[in-house]
Amino acid sequence: MEVNTRAGDDHQTGAQGCLRLCLRTTRRAPFMFCDRDEKGIPQFASVVSCRRKQPCQMSTKEKLISHVMKEEPVASANKVTVVGVGMVGMACAISVLLKDLCDELALVDVMEDKLKGEIMDLQHGSLFLKTHKIVADKDYSVTANSKLVVVTAGARQQEGESRLNLVQRNVNIFKFIIPNIVKHSPNCIILVVSNPVDILTYVAWKLSGFPRHRVIGSGTNLDSARFRHLMGEKLNIHPSSCHGWIIGEHGDSSVPVWSGVNVAGVSLQGLNPQMGTEGDSENWKAVHKEVVDGAYEVIRLKGYTSWAIGMSVANLVESILKNLHKVHPVSTLVQGMHGVKDEVFLSVPSVLGNSGLTDVIHMTLKPDEEKQLMSSADTLWGVQKELVL
Amino acid sequence: MSSVLQKLITPLASSPAEPPRNKVTVVGVGQVGMACAISILLRDLCDELALVDVMEDRLKGEMMDLQHGSLFLKTSKIVADKDYVVTANSRLVVVTAGVRQQEGESRLNLVQRNVNVFKVIIPQIVKYSPNCTLIVVSNPVDVLTYVTWKLSGLPKHRVIGSGTNLDSARFRYLMSERLGIHASSFNGWVLGEHGDTSVPVWSGANVAGVNFQSLNPDIGTDGDKEQWAATHKAVVDSAYEVIKLKGYTNWAIGLSVADLIESIVKNMSRVHPVSTMVKAAVVVADSLESEVGEMPDKERMWRKWLWNHNLVATSWDCGKGLLPFPGLHHHPGPQVGAEHQLHHQEGSAEVVLPEAARNLTCQRR
């Protein structure tokens, strides 16, 4: 018994491959006929008989797979964009991929060859990853509908150069990047990594026009991680069990809050009241100095830092995308806190979730710690007000 | 006045520190070595990581950079030194050291340069970790795995080359892109030499058990209208392509090595296409002989047999009259380790290797 084809269909089954497929799907005698729906997709369920006159025209893919969804596919739910594919950007990318944090990753840069090379290299590892869509382009349209955009683009600190020297160079780069990001992902959260991060987070906030909870600087998340690592080495405990917060400016004038340093809630300053002062026989102040110098040291030895900042960023991305409400020391608007009067971004312990940076923890700071924060704020404002935005 | 440490912590056991159970060493802290290191760390595969290199500043910088991230990791000890003593008691040693492929340079040209480097590295590794498993990544990987095996004196099942694990991953990615599915849902194996003459085994390519060759009997041949063979060509060319664009490849090989290490450290008994000792050549020749009687040119018949069975994609012309196999004694079979203890042809490998590397000419099929 034969079933007529729909109008416009001139396809006739009959070549060996189709024959085998027909036999396998229906186990009937070889004279099979594929019905087709309005889109021309073969309906194997309706195979009845066939007229073998010409070789089968179906591609291997069509023989293998039937597309059954009529609507457009749903857009990615957790898309992350990384702007800048230098060492820091790629370290962030690989850390985010290895932690299975996003279902789509987009990379953007101005250097097209390097960008294409990096995207191919990551895609070749797709078998080992759980991020199916990895895309890249010079054009920002590839970043559309991102939940989170990590900005690592910008000039790199040279050996011995302070972060503040990079400012104007990076502001000019941001004037191009930020509007492009906002245009394609108007509801995203921007995470700024480029240095000097506190100033550039302010710049990104101004240029984007976003509310303050959606512009975050990676801040002293990394400094605190370095501090906890060094503390862990000193005490022979894993860093995750050593608690210590470094706040304020990411860089030379960051503030270690000694009163909060503890293991299992036991305040170390309670055990050693000299901690952090010049008179401290254990010289804990040197630990903080090592944190500040750490970046310069690594830059001197290998030319740049990448792995630590990449892991730190992935840590923040995880809290945001998984809506963890974890507390991280990240750079946010501190105007009105700790005596700061200007529109300045500094790192304070903040709650991160999928809305962004929703809450800030009030730290009880000693007078000299507050003074340090205020003087950092003054320095940063001194630089910020000279900027041409 | 007792220190913070003493006031805070009361030790319960005064025994010396336990040795590491899953220590991994990475030799070479170039782009490939560091990509392997970060993949291993982010997959929580080892309890101690050691890095070794000759460039001391870079080595120290990389170690510090990784240590600064230790809050986010579950590997408590990351060490590095120029001296191989830091690698002691490793369970696995990943060798990425060596000179990098230049743009347009074929992998075989790297051989002699890398052999000299390995003569320094391998004995040191084995001295401090006599029970380790070696994974060789440096190119040309098949030849250098052989070299490592000879220099280390380790049994064959403990010297593995990363081989076509990466080529297969690339193949599965590129094929699955054409089909719109995830790479892990497309099953396909690329065997043979890691590089120009790798062999895609089309007869095994399948999705959900549906065999591609039965859907398209021409697949992989020149007569194939859909040109699926172009996908395999893209696999071969992809390394050169990425090198041309960004100067080197690292992320994919790093992920591939971490995948192998995961199988080994977690004792998963997974099947990977890696570079291992293949003595099947001799068995084939023997069976050929028994089938067809005495043959004047055993090697040529053996090659033809493999050709007919689609096990090689190139014909090699090795004027030495010895086993004319790409990578010589290293044709990867689809098994990890050497459970296949086949009859070994003594002696030929040493003679064959350096000379064959010079004399090999290969023609693409």
Image (cartoon, coloured by chain):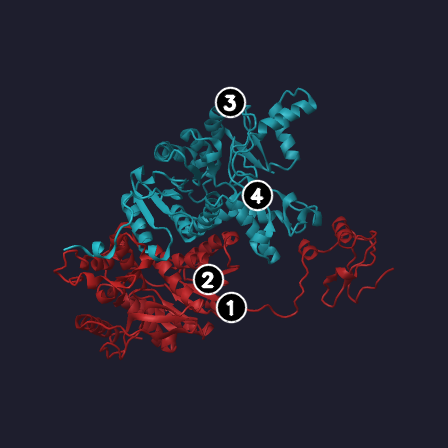
Q: CA distance from mark 4 to mark 2?
A: 30 Å
Discs 3 and 4 carry the same chain letter = yes
Q: Is residue B6 left or right of residue B90?
A: left
For the view shown, which residue lies furthest in the right direction?
Answer: A1
Query: What's the distance in space between the residues labelled 1 and 2, CA to CA?
Result: 11 Å
* A108, above or below B147, in the image: below
Query: How far apart, in angstroms, are the residues tagged by discs 3 and 4?
Result: 28 Å
Q: Which residue is mark 1?
A: A77
Label 3 or label 4, whichever lies nearer to me, is 3
Circle 3: residue type: Glu
Q: Closer to the N terminus: mark 3 or mark 4? A: 4
For the residues beneath circles 1 and 3, the answer to whether they share a chain is no
Give the class, few, some or many, for how many residues have Cα within 10 Å of label 3's Cα (few <14, many ≥20). few
> Which chain is disc 2 placed on?
A
Q: Position of residue B352 (x, y in %)?
A: 49, 26
Q: Are marks 1 and 4 on the same chain?
A: no
Residue under label 2: A101
